[in-house]
Image (tube, rainbow, N blue to C red):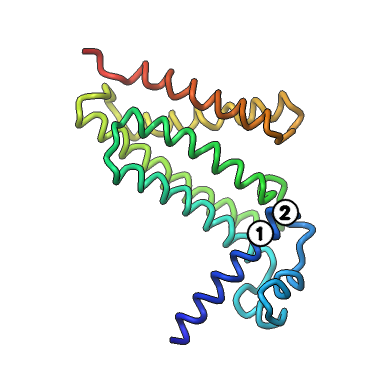
Amino acid sequence: MTEQLSSEKQAIILDAARKRFAYYGFSKVTMDEIAADVGMGKASLYYYFPTKESLFHEVIRLEKEQFLNDIRSMIDQKKAPCEMLRQYASKRVEYFRNLANLRALQFQQSAESRASFLELFKTFQQQEVALLQQVLDLGKAAGEFDVEDTRQSAEIIMQMFYGPRAWLLLKRDNRLDDDTYHALEQSAKQIVEVILNGIRKRK
């Protein structure tokens, strides 16, 4: 029972923190405000999360896990592999927007926290590549995709999706407005069609 209550309290804290970070950004949020949001003392909050950075780190980790779970759910539904890739591209833009709303892109980190975040992103990237490879394997097994090395192809597809984000942010002076996200969505759709034209098995 104690463990269950502890987990429930932690979930409440994370939900409140996510809302605060999404609205104000990391630098403008205080632990006092989050503690007040969940109706507990700051000392009790530090029992669950010793620093604001550790709390933010967990919020970002959950955001990533939600994205990965969405992709896993899509794979479990056994949709057509081509449609899976299209949905993956759309989910990726949505995920990037959520990160931007949390101000994760502008997060000022200490050296220790930077190393921790780097490891988090590295693990996430490996998990994402593995899921993409799974989609390609399904397409290959179904006779839809003509792909020799699905792992390598998954990594290349990942690289292709990273490119437009950097390009558009540079072109738009780092403006993250609705027009930028619309451009990202269009770019993601175009990239998927280019990929599908390259890997789809010729009848």
Q: Which residue is mark 2?
A: 23
Q: Which residue is mark 1?
A: 19
The quadrant in which the N terminus is found is bottom left
Out of 181 and 168, give the one closest to the viewer.
181
User: For residue 78, which numbered disc appears in the image?
Assistant: none
Mark 1 touches mark 2? (CB < 8 Å):
yes
Query: What is the distance, in whole Å, between disc 1 and disc 2 at their CAs?
Result: 6 Å
Out of 55 and 16, give the one closest to the viewer.
16
Name the residue located 36 percent from the left edge and 47 percent from the top edge: 72
Name the residue located 24 percent from the left edge and 29 percent from the top edge: 140
Name the residue located 27 percent from the left edge and 24 percent from the top edge: 145
Q: Badge 1: few (under 14), some or many (20 or more) residues near its Cα, within 10 Å?
A: some
Q: Secondary structure at mark 2?
A: helix
Name the residue located 26 percent from the left edge and 21 percent from the top edge: 146
Out of 154 and 83, give the one closest to the viewer.
83
Q: Residue furthest bottom?
A: 2
Residue type highlighted by circle 2: Tyr
Left or right relative to 35: residue 2: left
Q: Badge 2: few (under 14), some or many (20 or more) residues near its Cα, within 10 Å?
A: some
Image position, residue 38 (x, y; %): 66, 74
